[in-house]
Amino acid sequence: MFLSALILVFIFCMAAAQAEDMTLVRQNLARLIHAQTECFKMEAFSKSARKEDLETAAHAVVGRCAEQSHRFKVYSAAHDFRNPIQFEAYWAEEERKDLEIVKRMIGIVRTQ
């Protein structure tokens, strides 16, 4: 009986520790996403993004923010439940979405 109670206490403590770890992971992911988004915004509003065609400008903005994107990718991969092949497919889709978002940002800047 005592052993069962001890095991339950241990499981409860581990669950609480895992919940704290997940909160920390979520906070770090939010910080990394914010850094990437801010870089995209700053670069999309730069004068150099206005000189090229939309596709080239979007790729240039994403390229200038490669450091932030790489940090986000590495941290995400370390804390993701997918296997590496699934994660790479997921990440390729995320990069495609990022490029579309940057195109929209540049389009907004150009129409103002």
Image: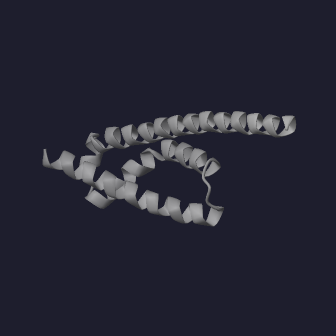
Question: If the image is split into quadrants, where does the C terminus sit?
Answer: top left
Figure colour scheme: one colour
Question: Residue at left 60%, top 47%?
Answer: 74
Q: Residue 16: name its quadrant.
A: top right
Q: Quadrant of residue 4?
A: top right
Q: Is residue 9 left or right of residue 21?
A: right
Decide if residue 57 is in sight here: no
Look at the image and tell me in which quarter the N terminus lies: top right
Instruction: Decide if residue 104 is on the left or right side of residue 62.
Output: left
Q: In front: 54, or 91?
A: 91
Give the percent coordinates (x, y) of residue 94.
45, 58
Using the image as rendered, state which of residue 41 and residue 14 is in the foreground.
14
Q: Residue at 58% across / 60% down in the picture?
A: 87
Left or right: 96 as drawn, with respect to 101: right
Give the image quarter of residue 65.
top left
Question: Residue 20's x, y, as percent?
Answer: 61, 33
Position in image of residue 88 (x %, y %) = 57, 62
Residue 106 coordinates in the image, percent (x, y)? 25, 50
